[in-house]
């Protein structure tokens, strides 16, 4: 590589704008020291370096961000999407919205292997004209738990042991075996889908149930799906081990290089829709994120496509500091009463105020760059921007008759959705039905996928205590006979061995599950 000619090079300075004429030697008394404490240039350099790291994300620490756009199809068949949502992102065919996408693993730290058996994060920030919309999803359609109060526990079980700092199957399956709602997720996670080949070849799912609201204030329940045009590819444990031996970041590398060479990855966004009510006719609750909505009853309708066509310029500024949250919705999109979603919505901005700082929304990657932002928020750690405000710079409050910011027009559709009634309680939802969809998922798999799932479960459960193994076989038998029997066989446990186990405390079995349990032995 040839050296840049001296006349083209800019002079190195410190952050105060002072030129640096020696970046190799600190200032000392005499050539051999001692160093002086007023050594401003050296102290600035080293003390800034000492603060280069911010806390990594408590989950999804390793990830990679790219930019692109979303293009709405505007309609499905002859029906305009505006019949269901007034969100401007979907308004007309061909409408494009800028976005940032961050894909991630969940459990490992910032430098961990991207070949892990782990869900993958699939988070999209749409910079819409009505402000930002974040759709924070995963590559698997369901989740381990359905109530946010259990999130710290499930993550603690999956993270390394607090003493040995190893990820321990015994801790993971100790928790999961006491958490029957996790079975559907486990059947997905331990199948080949649990190690996506890379970020370009994986699906994305909103997982939680959201709402759409139209111009009349009518609401529907929705679930989001992203389908990769590149196809879906996974790794076996063996493939993953080979890659991991020489590369911890193969998925980020693959995505970065594809975008650099102009091979822009693309996903189609599809939406499932249900009327906004409790749907007593279904044997699951539409707000339960451990369930999928059967596609034959609730077809996934294509609504647009996402293309990723630009890499970040700086990983720290744009990947480490980007901050997504499920509360970040725009007009026409809304929350459902899903008990996970409400907990997530608190958690994201809470952690970001700690992880990035109270003014994290002032950072370029997080700004609502396509909308006008005018708040009366002021100051705080690292405050940089001051919103111009109204005509009077003295007024940073509202209401005011002396020229501050004013409220927007009152919407005509302020009331929406069904009326809610209920007494305060701590009970779980009624239709838990924890096993049926897990069993169906197994039956839908091709033979090699079933074999891989059974082998992965057996290999992990072999490292667990006997009572944990037995309870897991009990759950798997309730999901599906063949699955339970095959895993049991691998562990030397028969249905007879576990038939006498009582249901877990607080576990709700429906009639069908009770019958399966009765017929176990
Ligand atoms: C990241 C909390 C469930 C997808 C995070 C972070 C927290 C968190 C604290 C770190 C955010 C940051 O530092 O910027 C929770 C809680 C959950 C939950 C409390 C349940 C109650 C889920 C579910 C999904 C999901 C069900 C998938 C649909 C993600 C993704 C990220 C993330 C994709 C990474 C975002 C990024 O790339 O910056 N979550 N989470 N989480 N979560 Fe969750």
Image (cartoon, rainbow, N blue to C red):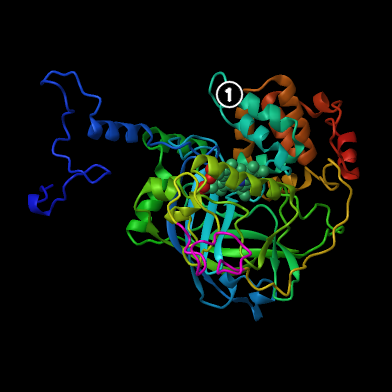
Within the image, what quadrant is residue 398 found in? bottom right
Residue 462 x %, y %: 63, 24
Which residue is label 1 attached to?
Answer: 161
**Is 7 drawn above or below residue 60 in the view shown?**
below
Residue 129 x %, y %: 52, 69
Question: What residue appears at the point 42 percent right and 52 percent down from the top-left corner?
Answer: 384
Residue 419 within the magenta-colored segment of the rendering = no
Question: What residue appears at the point 45 percent right and 49 percent down from the top-left corner?
Answer: 383
Question: What residue appears at the point 62 percent right and 53 percent down from the top-left corner?
Answer: 326
**Is 241 drawn above or below residue 330 in the view shown?**
above
In this orientation, which residue lies closer to the viewer: 474 or 186?
Answer: 186
**Is 411 drawn above or below residue 221 in the view shown?**
below
In this orientation, which residue lies closer to the viewer: 217 or 251?
Answer: 217
Residue 292 x %, y %: 71, 53
Residue 27 as seen in the image, left or right of residue 374: left
In this orientation, which residue lies closer to the viewer: 76 or 314?
Answer: 314
In this orientation, which residue lies closer to the viewer: 377 or 167?
Answer: 377
Residue 188 as seen in the image, left or right of residue 391: right
Q: Which residues are magenta?
A: 386-406
Residue 74 as seen in the image, left or right of residue 474: left
> Taken as a whole, is the magenta stretch helix, strand or loop?
loop
């Amino acid at each position: 590589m040839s050296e840049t000619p001296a006349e083209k090079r800019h002079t190195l300075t410190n952050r105060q704008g002072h030129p640096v004429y020696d970046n190799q030697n600190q200032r000392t008394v005499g050539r051999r020291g001692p160093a002086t404490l007023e050594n401003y240039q050296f102290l600035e350099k080293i003390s800034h370096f000492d603060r280069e790291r911010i806390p990594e994300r408590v989950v999804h620490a390793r990830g990679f961000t790219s930019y692109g756009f979303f293009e709405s199809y505007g309609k499905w068949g002859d029906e305009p999407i505006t019949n269901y949502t007034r969100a401007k992102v979907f308004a007309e065919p061909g409408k494009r919205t800028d976005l940032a996408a961050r894909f991630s693993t969940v459990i490992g730290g910032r430098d961990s292997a991207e070949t892990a058996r782990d869900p993958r994060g699939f988070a999209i920030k749409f910079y819409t004209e009505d402000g930002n919309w974040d759709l924070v999803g995963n590559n698997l359609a369901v989740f381990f738990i359905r109530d946010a109060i259990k999130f710290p526990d499930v993550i603690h079980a999956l993270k390394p042991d607090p003493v040995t700092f190893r990820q321990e199957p015994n801790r993971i399956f100790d928790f999961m075996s006491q958490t029957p709602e996790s079975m559907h997720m486990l059947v997905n996670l331990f199948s080949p889908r649990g190690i996506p080949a890379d970020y370009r070849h994986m699906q994305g799912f909103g997982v939680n149930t959201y709402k759409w609201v139209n111009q009349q204030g009518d609401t529907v329940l929705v679930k989001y799906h992203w389908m990769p045009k590149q196809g879906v590819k996974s790794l076996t444990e063996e493939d993953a081990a080979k890659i991991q031996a020489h590369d911890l970041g193969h998925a980020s590398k693959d995505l970065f290089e594809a975008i650099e060479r102009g091979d822009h990855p693309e996903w189609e966004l599809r939406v499932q829709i249900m009327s906004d009510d409790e749907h007593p006719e279904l044997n699951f609750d539409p707000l339960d994120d451990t369930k999928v909505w059967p596609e034959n009853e609730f077809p996934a309708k294509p609504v647009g496509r996402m293309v990723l066509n630009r890499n970040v310029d700086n990983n720290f500024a744009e990947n480490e500091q980007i901050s997504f949250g499920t509360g970040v919705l725009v007009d026409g999109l809304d929350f459902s009463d899903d008990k996970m979603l409400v907990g997530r919505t608190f958690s994201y901005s809470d952690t970001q105020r700690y992880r990035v700082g109270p003014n994290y929304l002032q950072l370029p990657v997080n700004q609502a760059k396509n909308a006008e932002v005018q708040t009366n928020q002021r100051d705080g750690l690292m405050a940089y921007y001051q919103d111009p405000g109204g005509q009077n710079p003295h007024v940073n409050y509202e209401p005011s008759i002396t020229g501050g910011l004013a409220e927007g027009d009152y919407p005509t559709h302020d009331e929406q959705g069904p009326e809610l009634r209920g007494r305060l309680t701590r009970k779980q939802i009624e239709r838990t039905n924890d096993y049926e969809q897990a069993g169906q998922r197994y039956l839908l798999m091709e033979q090699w996928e079933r074999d891989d799932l059974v082998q992965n479960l057996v290999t992990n459960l072999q490292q667990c205590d006997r009572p944990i193994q037995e309870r897991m076989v009990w759950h798997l038998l309730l999901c599906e006979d063949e699955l339970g029997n095959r895993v049991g066989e691998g562990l030397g446990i028969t249905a007879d061995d576990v038939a006498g186990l009582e249901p877990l405390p607080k576990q709700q079995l429906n009639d069908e599950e009770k019958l399966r349990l009765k017929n176990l032995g």
